[in-house]
């Protein structure tokens, strides 16, 4: 999925360094997202988990692409993660 890779690379190589340079930040990085963006956050958590330390994901659209993400084996974490996932009715 080329679009996914390009967006994640942008977050990692351009957006996070820009935010760190422009604002007073700590080394702890948190991703908060919902719905289709929640799907992206879940995909980042599964495929590139060390990009963020904390994940708050609400109502991720896991139905997307015939629920293919649910069949994926997540990458192993190399550091401690805090993950909160909420799904509504």
Image (tube, rainbow, N blue to C red):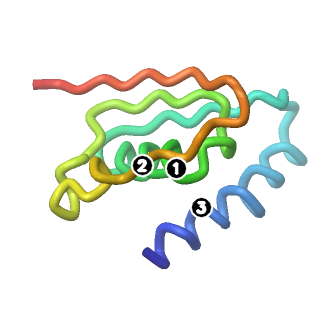
Measured from the top left, where is residue 31 in percent x and y? 56, 36
Q: Is residue 24 left or right of residue 81?
A: right
Q: CA distance from mark 1 to mark 2?
A: 12 Å
Query: Could you classify mark 2 by the number of other residues whose Cα lies within 10 Å: few (under 14), some (14-19), or many (20 or more)?
Result: few
Q: Which mark is residue 56?
A: none
Q: Which residue is mark 2?
A: 73
Q: Which badge, 1 or 3, comes first in the chain's sequence?
A: 3
Which secondary structure, mark 3? Answer: helix
Q: Which residue is mark 1?
A: 44
SS class, disc 2: loop
Q: Relative to 24, does residue 48 appear above or below in the rendering? A: below
Quadrant in the picture for residue 59: top left
Identity of the residue drawn at 30% across and 23% down: 86
- Quadrant that contains the C terminus: top left
Residue under label 3: 8
Percent across and percent down for residue 7 are: 56, 66
Quadrant of the image containing the N terminus: bottom left
Residue shown at the point (51%, 42%) measured from the top left: 45
Q: Of the residues under marks 3 and 2, which one precedes in the sequence?
A: 3
Q: Could you tell me if the residues under marks 1 and 3 are in contact, i.e. CB atoms within 8 Å?
A: yes
**Element under label 1?**
helix
The CA distance from mark 1 to mark 3 is: 8 Å
Q: Residue at x 48, y 78 (%)?
A: 2
Nearer the viewer's eye, disc 1 or disc 3?
Answer: 1
């Amino acid at each position: 999925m080329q679009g996914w890779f390009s967006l994640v690379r942008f977050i990692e190589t351009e957006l996070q360094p820009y935010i760190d340079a422009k604002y007073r930040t700590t080394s702890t990085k948190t991703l908060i997202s919902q719905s289709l963006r929640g799907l992206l956050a879940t995909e980042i958590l599964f495929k590139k988990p060390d990009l963020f330390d904390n994940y708050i994901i609400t109502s991720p659209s896991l139905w997307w692409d015939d629920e293919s993400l649910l069949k994926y084996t997540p990458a192993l974490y190399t550091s401690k993660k805090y993950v909160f996932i909420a799904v509504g009715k």
